[in-house]
Image (cartoon, helix red, strand yellow):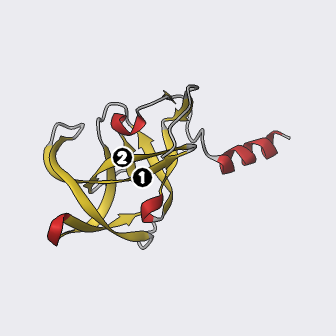
């Protein structure tokens, strides 16, 4: 895994992330420093024998058939309190997160975020290390966006 250097990496309040072990690329994630754990919108959760779970990662809000089928080991079960105060029992799994130049193993809770704009929420535990969140910016690590901005400026 690659960890950040001493110089902090500045990210925006929303970024594209990859989950390479699951072949998920450019998933829109909202950074939430108020949440301890990260969460991911999934559907069709099915517990399997020997501590595994199968689910579908829904990649896009509007294009419902854009999904990836995943089988992962359950790392733990835990209670999570939402921002509205509602508590629920969730399954947690681990996978590799790629956020710009950073690649690290994180824990993710599986949840229905269908009504939410962002498919993934990045909590504090995933942001440990030399990462600074600039709440006035978004998609600071997106190379495609930067190229468009440079072309538009010329």
Relative to residue 140, is residue 94 drawn left or right? Answer: left
The residue located at (54%, 28%) in the rendering is 136
Q: Label 2, label 1: how many angstroms apart (C-alpha)? A: 6 Å
Q: Nearer the viewer, residue 62 or 75?
A: 75
Give the image location of residue 50, x and y in percent.
Answer: 16, 68
Q: Nearer the viewer, residue 2 or 133?
A: 2
CB within 8 Å, label 2 to label 1: yes
Is residue 51 something that shows in the picture?
Answer: yes
Relative to residue 33, is residue 134 drawn left or right? Answer: right
**Label 2 crowd bin: few (<14), some (14–19), many (20+), radius 10 Å:** some
Residue 106 numbered tag: 2
Q: Would you place residue 154 above or below residue 27 in this image? A: above
The residue located at (80%, 46%) in the rendering is 151
Q: Secondary structure at mark 2?
A: strand
Mark positioned earlier in the residue sequence (2 or 1) = 1
Residue 21 numbered tag: none
Relative to residue 132, is residue 57 drawn left or right? Answer: left
Give the image location of residue 28, x and y in percent.
Answer: 48, 51
- Residue under label 1, please give it: 96
The residue located at (22%, 58%) in the rendering is 74
**Label 1 crowd bin: few (<14), some (14–19), many (20+), radius 10 Å:** some
For the C terminus, which image quadrant?
top right
The residue located at (55%, 38%) in the rendering is 138
Q: Secondary structure at mark 1?
A: strand
| Total labels drawn | 2
Q: Residue furthest right?
A: 154
Give the image location of residue 34, x and y in percent.
Answer: 32, 31
Is residue 59 something that shows in the picture?
Answer: no
């Amino acid at each position: 895994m690659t960890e950040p250097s001493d110089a902090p990496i500045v990210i925006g309040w929303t970024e594209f992330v990859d989950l390479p072990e699951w072949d998920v690329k450019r998933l829109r994630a909202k950074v939430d420093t108020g949440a301890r754990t990260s969460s991911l919108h999934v559907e069709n959760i099915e517990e399997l024998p020997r501590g595994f779970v199968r689910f579908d990662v829904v990649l896009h809000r509007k294009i419902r058939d854009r999904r990836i089928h995943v089988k992962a080991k359950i790392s733990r079960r835990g209670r999570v309190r939402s921002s509205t105060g509602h508590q629920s029992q969730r399954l947690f799994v681990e996978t590799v997160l790629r956020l710009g130049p950073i690649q690290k193993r994180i824990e993710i809770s599986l949840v229905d975020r269908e009504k939410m704009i962002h498919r993934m929420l990045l909590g504090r535990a995933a942001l440990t290390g030399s990462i600074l969140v600039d709440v006035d910016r978004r998609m600071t690590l997106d190379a495609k966006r930067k190229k468009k901005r440079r072309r538009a400026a010329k």
